[in-house]
Image (tube, rainbow, N blue to C red):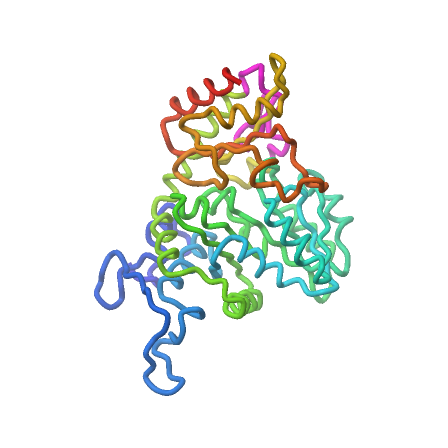
Amino acid sequence: MRADDLQPNLAVDTLAVHAGQEPDELTGAVAPPIYQTSTYAQDGVNQPRRGYDYARTVNPTRDRLQRAVAALEGGGEGIAFASGSAATAAIAGLATPGSEVVVGDDVYGGTYRYLDKVRRPDGVEPTFVDLAGEQDRLWEALNERTRLVWFETPTNPLLKVIDIAASSATVRERFAGAPDRPLIVVDNTFASPVLQRPLDLGADIAFHSATKYLAGHSDTVLGIAVTRDPATAERLRFLQNAMGGVPGPFDCFLVLRGLRTLHLRMERHVSNARAIAGWLATRDDIEWLVHPGLTSGVHAHPQAPACLAQMRGGSGMVSFRPKARDGASSTERAVAIAEATKIFTLAESLGGVESLIEVPAQMTNQSVAGSPLEVPPDLVRLSVGIEHVGDLIADLAQALDAS
């Protein structure tokens, strides 16, 4: 299958296998080669062959990855970076000094750190707002200086779900008739394009820490943004090249290889996470529990309508807070649970085939300590892998029971 043979209406399952994965143009190799090169021979002075002059600017393996993720997101242009944080920095670079960024009030600690500690001193003002639920808060936060509206959905680590279509409509209505409006930026890392396509719902930029679900095997670090707006794509490509935070070809290859099973892995992540959330909901030592697939019962997701409307099946993530018990505080129990699991690995990150467990307040979200975004110290976050769900539940049961 050639790149121009792919139709935009193909199912995401088919795109995951074929987009960017076309046989090598030169040899027909079904597994395309990795172009591990820093530079390219030119046919004459300033006459690069097929546009390839220097690998920071362009690389065939990176081209394939960018094309693949763009196809999975429903079309547009992909721009890959050395990490999710590098993608964050480039997108944040679209906001100029004197402008504002409206940001969801539950984001990855590194995102908060960059916007608050790097861009704020540069003259870009981040305003953190609860964007889940009613649109009044977003409307009131917008003003003529707003350049970006930025949120994760589901969020990290509280798994709030923000209505992308409603938020996009609010921004467009608020700036109707204005010469320019803020760009809507959605971090799609926790969902992946298999479960959710922000661009189809009105977002201008969707981006990922491809380290997580896209690569899926905890063996590479990479970030990627997708946009359908040519001017935004051109600016992000410029920043990609000028800042130099580009991924190496082998990292691009690893993500490309991971994409081929993304749809299968996400199906198992979601089904396992839903089963674990349902099991946790039956325990009387759980104080609080959230999972986008829980749409009924005492632990029903507070944004259940948005979950059902924009997500396909839920999520592979589960967060909960245990109750204090037998003289142990809830925070002490959270730490004990995280340290007692045997199949769940105590580690940062998420989205790999293996299940991970962490206490965000002391790990991935330490950067928000003491801020309005501070997360509860007794919060436990699960990245549910693709192991047998019975083994995962038994592992959590012994850890909970022992804590």
The residue range painted magenta reads: 281-305
Q: 186 above or below 361?
A: below
Residue in the image at 71% along x and 67% along y: 179
The question of residue 285 being in magenta is answered with yes
Residue in the image at 39% along x and 57% along y: 252
Name the quadrant containing residue 143: bottom right
Residue in the image at 37% along x and 45% along y: 13
- Residue 277 place in picture, x, y as percent: 51, 25
- Residue 147 place in picture, x, y as percent: 69, 60
Name the quadrant containing residue 354: top left
Q: On the rendered structure, is 286 left or right of 8?
A: right
- Dominant secondary structure of the magenta stretch? loop
Q: Residue furthest top?
A: 326
The question of residue 163 being in magenta is answered with no
Count of labels in the image: 0
Q: On the rendered structure, is 116 left or right of 4?
A: right
- Residue 273 place in picture, x, y as percent: 47, 30
- Closer to the camera in the image, 332 or 58: 332
Name the quadrant containing residue 104: top right
Q: Residue furthest bottom?
A: 45
- Residue 3 place in picture, x, y as percent: 34, 62
Q: 300 above or below 93?
A: above
Q: 178 above or below 260?
A: below
- Closer to the camera in the image, 392 or 162: 392
- Closer to the camera in the image, 393 or 377: 377
Q: Where, quadrant-wise, is the N terminus in this rendering?
A: bottom left
